[in-house]
Image (cartoon, rainbow, N blue to C red):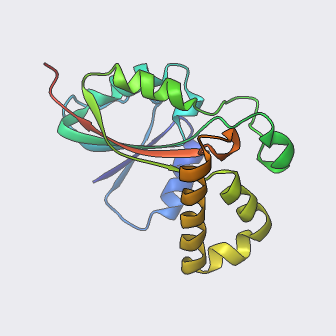
Amino acid sequence: MYIATDISMEGLQLNRSRNPFGNSVYVVCSVGSLPFLRNSIDLLCYFGVLHHTQGKSRAILNDAKVLKSDGYIMLHEPLKRPAILKYILKNEEESLHEGRVIEKNLFDDLNNIRELKIIALKEMNTIIMSGFLRFFQGCILREKSRYHFMVRIDAFFMKILRKICPYFKPAEILMLLKKVESS
């Protein structure tokens, strides 16, 4: 069973219109206060919602209570970029009601939650990828092999240059967390 949550009815209606499966339930609620029984959910997915919340780690910790033992959280969030990038990537400015996640703060917060362990992590989308997507989006996204090639180039720049140049830090993070028994 798939359960979609959102703080707005419009978000849930959009989700429902794109979901071809009949095994779905739609619930209006917010991150950090999921209205489900403890130990009842196998997987929680956060796709770009944490940067809208005030207490990111508190919200995750509260929501982890509904996870079954050995349950998972998949997290995908935009990361704070160097300030100069707003002049380069003019159409990608942050809205006034949100802020991107600060990577160090996210890791610090997650490391303080004993019930969750990071088991997989992927950082992606440096200024190289953002620039190429800005100017060649149609060309890159139309063909899978071009997109994968750009992802490899992006990973190369991030691995090689991120230590010497702050502009090659990732703009997004994808993370898999596992609920573990606290000792």
Q: Is residue 141 above or below residue 64?
A: below
Q: Residue at x 48, y 24 (%)?
A: 56
Which residue is at the front of the view, 157 or 25? 157
Picture mark count: 0
Quarter of the view holding residue 45: top left
* Closer-to-camera residue (105/179): 105
Residue at the image position 53 percent from the left and 61 percent from the top: 17
User: Taking 66 as reference, is 170 left or right?
Assistant: right
Depth order, front residue of 137/108: 108
Q: Provide residue 169's location: percent of width, then percent of height.
A: 61, 43
Q: Residue 61 at what x, y percent from top left?
A: 34, 23
State the residue at coordinates (57%, 73%). 149
The correct choice, above or below, for 123 with respect to 70 in the image is below
151 versus 4 height, above or below: below
The relative height of residue 127 versus residue 63 in the rendered view (above or below) is: below
> Where does residue 141 sit, x and y in percent of width and height?
64, 73
Residue 16 x %, y % = 48, 57
Nearest the camera: 89 or 15?
Answer: 89
2 relative position to 14: left or right: left
Q: In the displayed structure, does residue 57 sit left or right of residue 42?
A: right
Residue 170 visible somewhere in the drawing: yes
Q: Is residue 32 visible?
A: no
On-image quarter of the C terminus: top left
Taking the spot 53% from the left edge, 32% from the top edge, the residue there is 103
Which corner quadrant holds the N terminus? bottom left
* Residue 72 sits in quarter: top left
